[in-house]
Image (cartoon, helix red, strand yellow):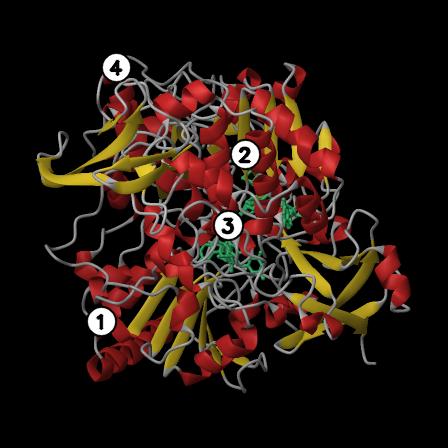
Amino acid sequence: MEQRITGAAISRRGFLRASAALGAAGLAGAGLTGLTAAGARADEGGGETLGYTYHNEHCLCNCMLQCTVRDDRLAMIQPRPNDDHRFQNVCLKGISEVQNIYGDARIQYPLRRTGERGSGQFERITWEEAFQTIAENFKAIQDKYGKEALWIQFSTEASQRFPPLLASVLGAQAGGMNGYDMGQGNGQIMAFAPWIGMFAQNTMWEWPEAAVVILANTNLVETSLTWSRGMLDAQEAGTKFICLDPRFSPTAGKADQWVNLRAGTDPAFFLGMTKYILDEGLFDREHVLAHTALPFLIDPETGACLADVAAGTDPKTGEPTEVKTFYLWDEATGAAVPHTAEGATPALEGEFTVDGKRYITQFTRLRKDMEPYTLEWTAATCDIPAEVVADVAEQYAAGPSIIDNGVGGIDKFGNNDVAGHCYALIASLTGNYGKRGTGCGIYGYHVTPYEAHLGAWKLPEGMAPAPSPQGFYDIVKGDTIHGAMFFGDIPTQKAANWNKTLEWLDSLDFVCLADIYHSSVTDFVDMVLPVCSKFECADAVGGIKCANAHILANLKVLDPLFESKSDFYIEKGIAEAMGLGDLFPADGEEYARALLDTDDPQMAGFTLERLQEAGGALRLIGSEDLIAPEVGYTYGTASGRQEPYYEALLPFGQAFPAWEAPCEAYPENPLREQYPLQFNQARSRFRVHSAYSGAKWIQEVAEPHIELNPVDAAARGLADGDAVEVFNDRGSFRTVLRLNEAVRPESAFMVESTYRQYLDGTIMQAVSNDTLNERGYALPFGPMIPFNDTLIEIKKAGE
Ligand SMILES: Nc1nc2c(c(=O)[nH]1)N[C@H]1C(S)=C(S)[C@@H](COP(=O)(O)OP(=O)(O)OC[C@H]3O[C@@H](n4cnc5c(=O)[nH]c(N)nc54)[C@H](O)[C@@H]3O)O[C@H]1N2
Ligand SMILES: Nc1nc2c(c(=O)[nH]1)N[C@H]1C(S)=C(S)[C@@H](COP(=O)(O)OP(=O)(O)OC[C@H]3O[C@@H](n4cnc5c(=O)[nH]c(N)nc54)[C@H](O)[C@@H]3O)O[C@H]1N2
Ligand code: SF4
Ligand SMILES: [Mo]
């Protein structure tokens, strides 16, 4: 192990500049947190230094960490002091890095595969050899098949230091849509455009202003771990939390009410609530008339809106655009009037004749479309009592109410967009969108409304990745890619049905992985490169990013351990071997300065020196108020109103949301005879996806396992602790069984994911469903992988 204490986590050159800048700025930045300068001695007598970095993005927390280095080793992790205590956080995973970064699972040297794929046989090679081999293979592939035949993709967690450059420099594809986490967003955003994300438009700090928060498909006390204070604070202030989850999750345990609906049936639950709200007159009539498109006239046969389209100009961009005028029925004059007409008395319901043709309002169609979703139907579909549906509907409609959806559960079912569409509809209908204490979308991670625009490293004009119209989930089904480089384990995570992915990997001329740990795909690639962790860098700084209303710096805590290099130096090394190294920044400092060079006033005066002086984090200027502005009632939709009726989805029968069963895990599927269990996969506080699988301290409290209700285990003659095989027609994997009454009968639960060495050499992804819903291609974020829409059976291993 080669490793050297950083002494000063800031180079001498940098330190001199820092002192000068500080003098000039009159101690700007100092005093904010009362921190000692980065690299200062923590204990004058004991050879200890402090260093600062940020931690995981993919647990959605990005904690700012203060790290003590003692005798050349990372010895202690603490939360970096912060005046705003909401941002002074750490969890067990962060603390345990003092063991994890030195652990057995660490990849230590560049390796070349010598045995069969999957054999785990490798030989150690030098970095020079690695870079040369990669350069030769990339060149051969791009010369033979075209630049875009090379795929260079970063895992989310791998792209959190310096923005990747290699795919741009080589004109390779850099990965398209992800195929997860945006399913409900696909169904929500069209109602409130141009909301272009999956996140709510306001933040969780507004929750105390809501009477009710429905938590749907989120286990936020684990998956937004450090932000779960937002839930607990609101609860203390009197907000009631209703958790919809087929499993008694830790979040269900903290909520005021738990609805244990059958997995994959959230759309049914909300459709049932909507019908009940309509029948009982619990909707907000005034809101619906003033702020939604529901009074607009539509053709009862085709569903098309009665509208005029004229050429106009966008007031913001000045670009030519279409201006659409819709029509309402004005009860005062007994005539159709433009939706923008002042002083009209719009009819909410009814049938009207305009120019000899029959029209109805959207609201009239809504009543008709919702007819099938009676309380009895809903109760049977969701397998819950009818009173629960009525009770939650009454509480939600009374409001002010918020729907906080996560991206687990239904998001990983074929009917995910229908759920999102339901949230938009019910929020519009009950006036629970626009004003304080209302809204829908993801709140868990959305803890600040602030996003700064960082600068960029400038590449020559036109140098960019090749267009990537397909997601990895599509790429693995085709033959357009001939070589790939993955920063982090893409193949076992970003596509379902591992055995098919493996066939695709076999079809490639060359495939390389750069990872910190021995992740599942490692044994299946041709070359493996060791990456350093966020505690290590070769320069004073190894990354800059914006998160949590701060600019964060990944400052040096340790030099790279073993023979590892940062992703940046790996990209640069490959580019150098291809004669393109000059296009890259010389080092981390030069890259960091380019990113800090921006006109964004929130970052005025932010320099590397100030970041170092402040212990790796500076609060964005003007970001004190974490409650986002009130959303209000003007939107970028065609009418400017809330539009929960999606004319564009008429061809799919989803103009208003309509019940659609899961694609595989529905109760009546004949496949249930062979594979009776629905496979619920979610995340836990003990890992960030597969990360920390190899961490010894975490292993002591959380071993990989699958959970069954004792009833289902008994029916199979299985006992707690049994080694089991989980299987279906797609494949199988092995793990340990644990019994848990919190798991719904007829389903199995498992935390996603872990390395194959902890699953007896098998991969959990082997059983997951890769059937995409075609409708997804017509939606803003593309189709989603239905990981949870999977049926399985479990038996004792070896039987
Ligand atoms: N500690 C930690 N935090 C993380 C991550 C991590 O790996 N570790 N990963 C991050 C990422 S990328 C993501 S996507 C998020 C995901 O985090 P969440 O959005 O919280 O999603 P999950 O943990 O997948 O599942 C949430 C809950 O949905 C329940 N569920 C399953 N099926 C259904 C259903 O049909 N209906 C309903 N209503 N509930 C259902 C599950 O039992 C589970 O308790 O977590 C993020 N945060
Ligand atoms: N079966 C099943 N599959 C799923 C899901 C599911 O529920 N079930 N959930 C899906 C969801 S929501 C998500 S978000 C994805 C997440 O799955 P991933 O994309 O795998 O998760 P990440 O945490 O982004 O990336 C983790 C990988 O990056 C590596 N890594 C971490 N930091 C660095 C770094 O600095 N440099 C490099 N080079 N590598 C690094 C880790 O060791 C690991 O290999 O999984 C999806 N796949
Ligand atoms: S893993 Fe823990 S310490 Fe690290 S960012 Fe997430 S919550 Fe914070
Ligand atoms: Mo995710």
Q: Which residue is drawn at 73% across and 43% down?
A: 260
The secondary structure type at the circle numbered 3 is loop
| Mark 2 and mark 3: Cα distance apart in space | 21 Å
- Mark 1 beta carbon near ligand 2 (under 8 Å): no
For label 1, the crowd category at 10 Å Cα-Cα, with few meaning under 14, some 14 to 19 and many 20 or more, is some
Question: What secondary structure is marked by label 2?
Answer: strand
The amino acid beneath tag 2 is Asp
Which numbered disc covers residue 404? 2
Callout 3: 10 Å neighbours few (<14), some, many (20+)? many
State the residue in front, 787 or 430: 430
* 226, 271: nearer the viewer: 271
Single out the mark in the foreground, 4 or 3: 4
Q: Name the residue at 40% across, 76% down.
A: 511
Sequence-first tag of 2 and 3: 2
Please tell me which residue lies in front, 619 or 10.
619
- At x 26%, y 35%, the residue is 453
In the image, what residue type sits under mark 1? Met
**In the picture shown, does residue 216 fall above or below 493?**
above
> Which quadrant holds residue 549?
top left
Disc 4 to disc 2, C-alpha distance: 36 Å
In the current view of this chain or complex, which residue is farthest to the front? 356
Local crowd at mark 4 within 10 Å, few (<14), some, or many (≥20)? few
In the rendered view of the protein, which quadrant contains the N terminus? bottom right
| Residue occupied by mark 3 | 658
Mark closest to the chain's N terminus, 1 or 3 = 1
Residue 78 in view, yes or no = no
Q: Quadrant of residue 232?
A: top right
Mark 2 Cα within 10 Å, few/some/many (few <14, many 20+)? Answer: many
Q: Which of marks 2 and 1 is nearer the N terminus?
A: 2
Q: Name the residue under label 1.
A: 578
